Image (spheres, rainbow, N blue to C red):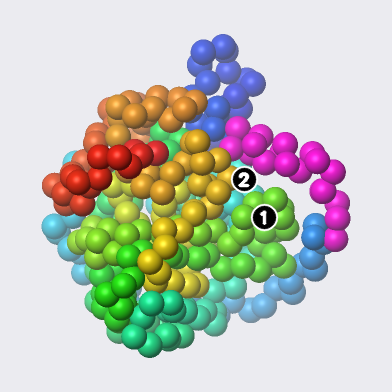
């Protein structure tokens, strides 16, 4: 592992970072496991035979042209770090899940579009990619744990998928779901989590210029640990909104309850917009650690993307917009 952060208990009192304190996301769940459920039949699952790896989705399509509208003033985070320091609870609750995530089978991969749409559809990932305008964007990525990266994503604007889906005017939200397969993803045998990982956006958010569906990283197909073959990037929101390895886009008039909101709704909400002035209940969000440079830098409202998105929220005074 390239960047090893000390565990919370190895740090002197008061030196624990939000990231180490954050290990408590796990403690919440251990509590549930302790009620005597662990060890039941749900914990079993046969390891899948390793198949010869087929080519990653659309591998001949990369690199894709960069869209210079999305620039950054910080250095890009090393590819090595972006691909070895990950959150992907389907494969474990520590950061070093990149090798475990290689069990993910991404071919064939079918994406379902359903709910309040003109016509429900199932699309093979390669067909979907062939129909979408792929481009590269440099985005800042800010995790709720107060670390951040700068990432060159490849993908396509989410509004192109919404166009393809042709939602009914009654649709207000798009709900995204990660795959569910506990034989492949050992984390999903931890049945106290509300699998599948679910996230949602309003239609206005999903069709905002910034909302991006990611299919690649560093000019190559997306590595499995980063959410191959299709994951969300909404850079004005905390990282947990960026659901990985998506299999379903469901259009609905009901606001979904997302994975983390379901687990701890006093700590993680639906909106999850970045705001340095609204602390997490257990740590400050005023600064963040750039995981590439190690520098601690100030966090910025909407992660610096206010020009694109602040208008979306101007009439939502009663909502918990920043958690
Ligand atoms: N399905 C799924 N998606 C997920 C997560 C997860 O555990 N499972 N973790 C989220 C969190 S908390 C973050 S910070 C980002 C991390 O993305 P990265 O590993 O590509 O940096 O993925 C998000 N998407
Ligand atoms: Mo995160």
The answer to whether the residue bearing label 1 lies less than 8 angstroms from the nearest atom of ligand 1 is yes
Q: Residue at x 74, y 71 (%)?
A: 48
Residue 290 location in percent, x, y? 36, 35
Seen in the image, is 314 located left or right of residue 100?
left
Seen in the image, is 57 located left or right of residue 54?
left
Residue 193 location in percent, x, y? 65, 52
Q: Magenta stretch: give its range.
A: 24-41
Using the rendered view, name the quadrant where residue 303 is placed: top left
Residue 283 location in percent, x, y? 45, 25
Counting labels gives: 2
Q: Do the CB atoms of the residues marked 1 and 2 lie less than 8 Å apart?
A: yes
Judge whether residue 149 can be spotted in this image.
Answer: no
Q: Nearer the viewer, residue 230 or 209?
A: 209
Residue wearing tag 2: 93
The extreme top residue here reads: 13
Residue wearing tag 1: 187
For the residue labelled by badge 2, is the local secondary structure a helix, a strand or a loop? Answer: loop
Q: Residue at x 41, y 49 (%)?
A: 270
Q: Nearer the viewer, residue 265 or 68?
A: 265
């Amino acid at each position: 592992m390239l960047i090893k952060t000390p565990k919370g208990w190895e740090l002197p009192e008061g030196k624990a970072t939000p990231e180490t304190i954050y290990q408590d996301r796990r403690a919440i769940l251990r509590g549930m496991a302790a009620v005597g459920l662990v060890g039941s039949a749900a914990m079993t699952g046969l390891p899948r035979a390793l198949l010869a790896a087929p080519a990653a989705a659309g591998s001949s399509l990369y690199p894709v042209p960069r869209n210079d509208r999305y620039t950054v003033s910080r250095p890009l985070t090393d590819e090595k770090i972006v691909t070895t320091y990950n959150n992907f609870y389907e494969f474990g609750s520590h950061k070093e899940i990149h090798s475990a995530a290689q069990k993910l089978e991404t071919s064939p991969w079918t994406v379902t579009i359903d709910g309040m749409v003109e016509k429900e559809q199932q699309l093979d990932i390669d067909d979907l990619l062939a129909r979408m305008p792929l481009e590269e964007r440099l985005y800042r990525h800010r995790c709720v744990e107060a670390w951040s990266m700068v990432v060159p994503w490849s993908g396509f604007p989410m509004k192109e998928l919404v166009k393809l889906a042709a939602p009914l005017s009654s649709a207000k939200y798009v709900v995204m779901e990660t795959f569910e397969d506990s034989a492949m993803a050992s984390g999903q045998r931890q049945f106290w989590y509300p699998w599948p990982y679910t996230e949602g956006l309003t239609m206005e958010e999903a069709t905002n210029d910034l909302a991006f569906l990611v299919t690649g990283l560093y000019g190559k197909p997306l590595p499995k640990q980063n959410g191959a073959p299709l994951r969300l990037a909404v850079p004005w929101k905390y990282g947990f909104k960026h659901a990985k390895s998506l299999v379903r886009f469901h259009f609905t008039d009901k606001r979904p309850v997302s994975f983390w909101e379901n687990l701890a709704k006093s700590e993680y909400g639906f909106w999850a917009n970045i705001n340095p002035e609204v602390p997490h209940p257990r740590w400050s969000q005023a600064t963040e650690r750039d995981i590439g440079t190690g520098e601690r830098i100030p966090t910025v409202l909407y992660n610096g993307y206010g020009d694109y998105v602040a208008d979306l929220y101007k009439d939502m005074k009663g909502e918990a917009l920043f958690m």
